[in-house]
């Protein structure tokens, strides 16, 4: 089995596991019962077909667990691509006190407008350069990375803050603080840190328009922001994104057919093609 085939098989194993858990839940453990739905929400049931709410019932039980699946898929990409990957990896190092003060200042200026000025716009390179000019006594600091990956062939280490494609503001603020602290450690324990989203719901990076993370990062231009294929290629190497797409497209028709027949209780369309 080639490296690409091995990665694709590992990706499919993660997705198989997720889908089987979801189907077990919606078909056996927590099925949609129309009589119960009508009793609890008689007005909704009177106005809207049951099938609409049945679809919502499935969606909630599918979307929520996918948050942890992205991390599992990232670990697959790191282990099969770069070399090694770890989840919730703890890094402890020493940071000069003035750098910590400047990190707090940068975050405060991004969050709040001054008395005579507008709230600052994010600019990672400028902010990091300002923070790194700080000095002072060293203070021990611990950062827990979402994903830590080692490029074993080139002896390089990367930290990733991996968030859902539409993250909230608080999550992103914490991620930026963690990344600034990692770069501020003396000596620096990483070669690079990234704020990463597994895919782009807006299509192109230049079109990314979700406002909450944009308070903390220039989502279109900051070099440490990776979205979609940029992230997968960085953590897994060249060809990882295509392996991911191929892996999903191969197993998608099977699960779509099962959901049509077993959950919706209707026959699937004749032309049931994957569309990732």
Image (cartoon, rainbow, N blue to C red):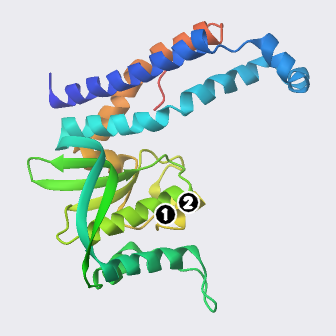
Which residue is identified by label 1? 173
Residue at 34% over, 49% down: 231
Residue 237 to residue 130: above or below: above
Task: Identify the image quadrant of residue 250.
Answer: top left
Residue at 39% over, 81% down: 102
For this orientation, the residue located farthest to the bottom is: 116
Residue at 55% over, 32% down: 63
Q: Position of residue 236 (x, y in %)?
A: 24, 42
Neighbourhood count class around disc 2 (C-alpha, 10 Å): few under 14, some 14–19, many 20 upward: some
Neighbourhood count class around disc 1 (C-alpha, 10 Å): few under 14, some 14–19, many 20 upward: some
As helix, strand or loop, the secondary structure at mark 2 comes to: helix
Mark 1 and mark 2 in contact (Cβ < 8 Å)?
A: yes
Task: Identify which residue, 263 or 61, lies in the foreground.
Answer: 61
Q: Position of residue 136 (x, y in %)?
A: 26, 85
Res. 208 in view: no
Res. 73 in view: yes
Task: Identify the image quadrant of residue 74.
Answer: top left
The circle on residue 169 is 2
Q: Position of residue 143 (x, y in %)?
A: 32, 58
User: Which quadrant of the figure contains the C terminus?
Assistant: top left
Q: Position of residue 134 (x, y in %)?
A: 30, 84
């Amino acid at each position: 089995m080639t490296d690409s085939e091995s990665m694709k098989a590992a990706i499919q194993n993660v997705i198989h596991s997720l889908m089987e858990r979801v189907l077990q839940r919606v078909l056996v453990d927590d099925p949609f019962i129309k009589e119960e739905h009508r009793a609890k929400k008689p007005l909704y049931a009177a106005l809207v077909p049951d099938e609409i709410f049945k679809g919502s019932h499935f969606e909630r039980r599918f979307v929520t667990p996918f948050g942890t699946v992205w991390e599992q898929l990232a670990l697959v990409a790191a282990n099969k691509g770069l070399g090694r990957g770890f989840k919730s990896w703890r890094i402890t190092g020493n940071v000069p006190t003035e750098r910590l003060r400047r990190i707090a200042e940068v975050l405060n200026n991004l969050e709040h407008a001054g008395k005579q000025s507008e709230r600052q716009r994010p600019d990672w390179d400028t902010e990091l350069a300002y923070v790194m000019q700080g000095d002072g006594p060293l203070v021990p600091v611990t950062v827990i990375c979402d994903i830590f990956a080692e490029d074993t062939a080139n002896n390089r280490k990367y930290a990733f803050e991996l968030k859902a494609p539409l993250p909230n503001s608080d999550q992103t603020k914490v991620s930026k603080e963690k990344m600034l602290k990692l770069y501020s450690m003396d000596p620096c324990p990483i070669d690079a840190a990234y704020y990463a989203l597994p895919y782009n719901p807006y299509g192109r990076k230049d079109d990314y328009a979700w406002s909450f993370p944009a308070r903390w990062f220039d989502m279109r231009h900051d070099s440490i922001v990776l979205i979609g294929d940029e992230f997968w290629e960085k953590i897994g190497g060249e060809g990882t994104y295509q392996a991911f797409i191929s892996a999903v497209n191969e197993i998608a028709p099977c699960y779509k057919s099962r959901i049509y027949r077993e959950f919706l209780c209707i026959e699937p369309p004749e032309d049931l093609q994957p569309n990732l």
